[in-house]
Amino acid sequence: MPKDNATGKIYYETFQEAVDRNRPKIPAVQKRLEDAGVKYVMAAWIDLHGIPKTKPVPMSDFEPLCLGKGPQFAVHSISFVPELSPADSDQVVVPDLDAVYICPWDTSMAIIFSDLYWEDAPYNVCPRQALKRAMKEAADEGYTGYAGVEPEFIVMKYDEDGQPVKAFDDDLGKAISPRRQAFGYDVEYSIDSMPFLKDMIDIIEGLGWNLHDVVAEGAYSQFELDFHYTNMLEMSDRLAFLRIVLKEVAKKHGMFVTFMPKPTVGDWRSGAHINMSMQHESRPGQNIFETEDGSDWSDESRWAVGGLMQHAEAITAITCPTVNSYNGLVPRVGGFEGGTVTWAPTNITYGFNNRSAQFRLPQSRHCIENRACDMTMNVYLAMAMHLSSALHGIKHKIDPGKPTDFDLYSKTDAELAELGIRRLPRTLFNAIEALRQDDMAEHVMGPVMRKSYLEYKNDEWERYHQSVTDWEVQEYLRLY
C-alpha cells in the first residue's frame, strides 16, 4: 500500500499535512527529473469524469509546486455542477511525489498525479481523495486492496474524406464497416498492427508495469493490454496515464484511440474489467481470497462477492458511466463481427469462470473480476466503490448465494427471476437511479460529489433521451 514511510499515512486531512509530507521528498524527486532531462512538469488532478487536468509549469517552479504554491484552479472546473460559486476560494493542487511519471514519448515532460485541497481540507469533489479515504478506512480494519485492469480500445484514423475508419482494417473503402470475420487473436492482423503496438509494448515495459500480453480483440482494430496488478491507487494512476500514452502514441502514427465502448452495432464492446484481490495485516503478503494453502477460494472471497453484489447497480453507474456503455451490456447482437454472442455480462451474479456473469471467479487466479466496466469510467471512484463494497461484505459476512455456473444468455427473464438473479441496469438512467438510492455510494463519494455526479449524469441522459436518432427515423418515418 502506498503509505508515507515516516507516518504510515496515505490520506492527509489538512493541506499543511500534505505539504509537510512532500518536503523531505522534493530534493530526490527533483534530481531524478532533472537527470532525466525533464523541463516541464504537469501536476495533474482528476475531474469528475476521471480525466486528468493541469497547468504546465517549468522545472524552475518545481519546489513551489510541491509545496502547494503552484497554479490554482477555479472550483467549477472539476465537477461541472459545482456547489461553490465564482466568489469562492480556488482549489489548490498538492502533487503526490509517489506518483511521478516521466512521459516516454517526450522525456522533457513529466506528469505528477495530485490531490485537491480547498480551504485547508481535502476538496470534497476530488475523486483521488475519495479513493485515498476508502483505502484509509480499509487500512484501519487491517485490509489493503489490489487490482488489475484489462483496458480495451479501438485504434482509428481519418480517411481522405475526413471520416473515421478503423486503422487496421482491409476494407478501407467504407467507414467503420463491421463484418463477421474474426479479428481476434489473428496472427496477420497482429503483425500488421505491430508498428503501433511495438511502441506501446516498449513504453509499458520501460515503465516497469510488467506487461503480460497484447491481444488483438474481437472487433477490427480493437486491442487489449494486460499488465500486472498493484495497489488500487497506483493502478488508478496507471490507467489514467495509460489513456494519455495511448492517445499520444497513436498521434505519432497518424491515428487516434477511442475508448467509446460501442462505436457501431457490429463492434465488440470495449471493456476494462477490474480484477480485485485483498490482503490483511494478519497474513501479510497473502491474498485473502484464497485459502492459506492456495488451493481454493476462501470464505472472505465469497463475502466480498456478496458485498459487491449488494451494491452492484450503484457500482455499475460508476464503471459504465455513459449512455453508450449500456449498448454493450447485452447478450446477443445481430450482424456481429465474429458471431452473435457478445460475451458481455448481463446479470448481477457470480460464477466460476463464467463470462456471462457480472462477477467472474477466474480459473487461473484468485481474484474477483467485475466484467461490467469500461474505459469511460472514473477509475478512482470505481476502485473506491469496489474496495468499500468488498470490505462491507467481509465485515458483515454477506452470503452471495450459489454460483451460477451456467450460460446466462440461454435463460429467459422468467427463469432468471425464479432463480432470484437480478438484471444489470439496462440504461444509464436505471443505473443513476440506483446510485441515487445507494447508501454506500454516498459514503464513498460523499453527499456533495454524489450530488454533482448525479446531476451531470441525469443531464447527460436527458440530452440523449430528447435526441432523435437515425434508427428512429429509419424505423418510424414511413411506417406510420
Image (cartoon, helix red, strand yellow):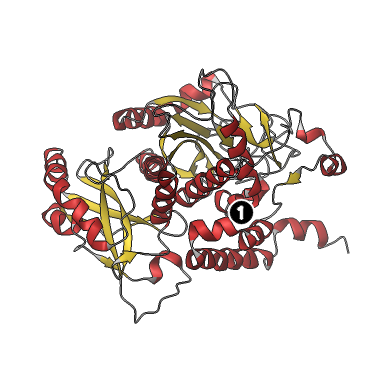
Taking 26 as reference, is 32 above or below it? above
Please give left or right for residue 60 compared with residue 90 in the image. Answer: left
Q: Quadrant of the N terminus?
A: top left
Name which residue lies at 15% across and 59% down: 64
Q: Which residue is mark 1?
A: 314
Front-most of residues 435 and 36: 435
The image quadrant that residue 430 belongs to is bottom right
Q: Secondary structure at mark 1?
A: helix
Q: Nearer the viewer, residue 105 or 311?
A: 311
The 10 Å Cα crowd at callout 1, few under 14, some 14 to 19, many 20 or more, is many
Q: Report whether 435 appears left or right of 288.
A: right
Which quadrant of the structure image shows residue 399?
A: top right
Indicate the quadrant containing the C terminus: top left, top right, bottom left or bottom right: bottom right
x%, y% of residue 242?
39, 41
Q: Residue at x 56, y 30 (%)?
A: 217
Foreground: 77 or 359? Answer: 359
**Disc 1 marks which amino acid?**
Ala
Numbered label tally:
1
* Residue 333 in the image, given as x and y percentages of width and height: 74, 39
Does residue 393 appear anywhere in the picture? yes
